[in-house]
Amino acid sequence: MEAVALQQPIPTSFLSPPRPNHLLLTATTLSHLKQIHAHLLRSGLDLSAPFLSKLLSLPLSSPSSLDYALSVFFHTPHLDARLCDRVLRVLSRTSAGESRRALTAYGRIRWDGLLLDRFSFPTVLRVAARAGGDDWVAREAHGLIAKLGFDSDPFVQTALVRLYAACGRVADARGVFDRMSQRDLVAWGVMLDGYCQTGCYGEALQLFEEMKSSNVIPDQVILTTVLSACGRTGNLMVGQAIHSYVVASSISMDLHLQSALINMYSTCKSMDNAQKLYDSIYPKNLVSSTAMVFGYAKIGKIKIARSIFDQMPDKDLVSWSAMISGYAESDQPNEAIKLFNEMQVSGVRPDMITMLSVISACAHLGALHQAKWVHYFVDKNGFSDVLSINNALIDMYCKCGSLVDAQKIFDEMRHRNVITWTSMITGCAMHGDGRSALALFDQMKAEGVEPNGVTFVGLLYACSHTGLVEDGWRIFNSMIQDHNIEPKHEHYGCMVDLLGRARLLQEAFELIESMPFTPNVVVWGSLLGACKVHGNVELGELAAKRLLELDPDHDGAYVLLSNIYAKASRWDDVRQVRTLMKCKGVSKERGCSWIELDGKVHEFLMGDESHPRSSEIYGKLEEVVRELGLVGYSPDIGSVLVDLEEEEKKGAVLWHSEKLALSFGLMNSSKGSCIRIAKNLRVCEDCHTFMKLVSQVYEREIVLRDRSRFHHYKDGVCSCRDFW
């Protein structure tokens, strides 16, 4: 009956002056109240304040009903502090995205010069913090609070601390916090959370120590916050102390605290402790399981991480991203991309963090087809304006062999930061285009972008792989004199590499001797690599000795020294080094190459026969060797660094993984097409010659990415000009 009555016109006699408030009291729904409002407006009666009061007493949950309440508020002429406070409270009980209505109401209150009591300010400040931090509200409200004498109220002060932290003004938040005469558990928690939200994890741990000194007993929420700070800073000692405190104090170990402890141990790579806690939880929860996946992936135990991931009944975006990132960082890019595709099928939409992991996996894989698909996905799903995504795409295209695509993204970017410029400079360096890298650096400076240490690593790398010794010295000196950046190990390593590649081995050694700090394995490794290339046994032995003093189990040092001896035909010394490697359990990294065909990546090892078309591939390789023999090719057995008979050496050098990948590529391509190959080690001299001749005889462009750079072979010439 009531529903029918609401649809009927309200008799005008009901709106006579003696009974207006009674009429408002009869309204029980928003639609009924809107009908009354319409009649009030037509009758000209000013019942705005009581009408607004009645409106605020009804449930207002939808955006339209909240907008209606705000509209009524703006058209109410006579407001008091109590009614203003009610408006703010009602409008503040919405989601963070809708909470701007309360700030709009606050703006009207301030514009009209209406008075607010001390109970209104915590509401306003809380809403401003939930809205992501409104700096104008923080400054304006703080001034008014001080003017009205409410700045010593602990509730107002706590709300101010929260808002300043949300605005990123953590120093102002701490200033208010330090002036508080009474700091309860909530105030400490807000300040600790403020430090963590702004990335000041070290300050959070210091504040926690002050809290303990103040004899304030932390609760589960605060302990969870502090454990997060321990994980972020890698402070296992404090994290373990908190765990011991929880056990000793018989604090209830709720789900959040358990998950925080597991996350702390996992982030600190203490997986034994994390596993003990995880085993004690039943049923397993999403947060702790994700932390375990993340922790095991970080220490390279990817199979255990995947096992836990597969056992999770429900997976959210964070858990998918943790597993994808684990694969990407564990040199398993194919698995990362495969899992990303599974995530799409499951209906989980990726975020920026997920996409960065997928882009990183594509970059590592070096597969241009996959790279273009990921780029298409980025554009289609609204990530194309994200600066960090575009920077990652530049890096991806450079590592997938397409400097043209990288340059296109770079040119179309509306905003560029130092990472953007550095990525493009490093890309040019990777492709052996040192002159373009230097030109980009000049353009970068002209646009007022200040380079950082990583930028100079890219520039020195560019000079090194192009043989620009004078430019390298100029850049190295400019870094110190013009940009006040002190060279680090990686900068000296690049300079040693530059000088070593240019056969200036003695000058490289003298630079190492002049370093203001102890050379590390990177620096000595650069010299050792140069000695291997140029056959300098004496200096190579010295570099290997220094390197092994710093890292006795460094596999690269043994391998390079063995290769230096092999190049000098000192086979007894080779056997001695190999025996030492065997005793220490050090193994040489096996050569591996990848080639992409129709969106699928095919992997080859040296002498590999595991491919389904293996017999065809070896047949094609024999054909290629015969064809190249007609133009003067003969296998360079000097590239074989083991003591074998001459015929065995010829066989060994012909079975290198990149030759197998190339043969497979020739089987599945036509004249004028491009074959793209990625390799995990430095390409040897024989394979380099082989690729050049194939590009000429078979009329293909070949793009080969080895451990240090790209080689673009076309018409019998390589882009590196035989300098690599």
Image (spheres, rainbow, N blue to C red):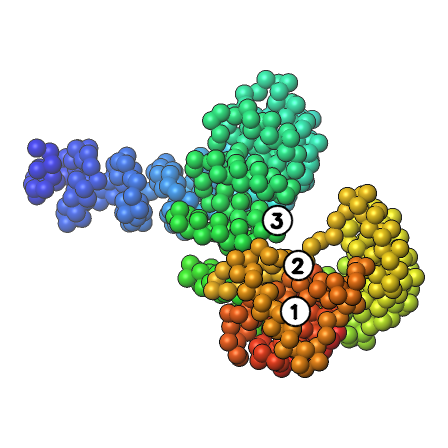
What's the CA distance linking mark 3 and mark 1? 22 Å
Going 45% across and 40% down the picture, which residue do you hit? 315
Going 66% across and 81% down the picture, which residue do you hit? 630
Q: Earlier in the sequence, mark 2 or mark 1?
A: 2
Going 61% across and 45% down the picture, which residue do you hit? 199
Taking the image as shown, residue 721 lies to the left or right of residue 73, namely right
Tag 2 secondary structure: loop
Q: Residues within 10 Å of mark 3 (few under 14, many from 20)?
A: some
Which quarter of the rendered picture does the N terminus lie within?
A: top left
Circle 2 residue: 606
- Give the percent coordinates (x, y) of residue 571: 87, 58
For badge 2, the amino acid type reads: Met
Going 70% across and 60% down the picture, which residue do you hit? 681
For badge 1, the amino acid type reads: Phe
Taking the image as shown, residue 239 lies to the left or right of residue 334, namely right
Circle 3 residue: 330
Tag 1 secondary structure: strand
What's the CA distance linking mark 2 and mark 1? 20 Å
- Give the percent coordinates (x, y) of residue 83: 34, 38
Circle 1 residue: 710
- Give the percent coordinates (x, y) of residue 674: 55, 74
The foreground one among 285 and 653 is 653
For badge 3, the amino acid type reads: Ser
Asked whether the beta carbons under mark 2 and mark 1 sit within 8 Å of each other, the answer is: no
Residue 487 disc label:
none
Kindly report which numbered mark, 2 or 1, lies closer to the viewer in this rendering: 2
Determine if residue 541 is in view.
yes
Kindly report which numbered mark, 3 or 2, lies closer to the viewer in this rendering: 2
- Give the percent coordinates (x, y) of residue 552: 83, 46
Q: Residues within 10 Å of mark 2 (few under 14, many from 20)?
A: some
Determine if residue 547 is in view.
no
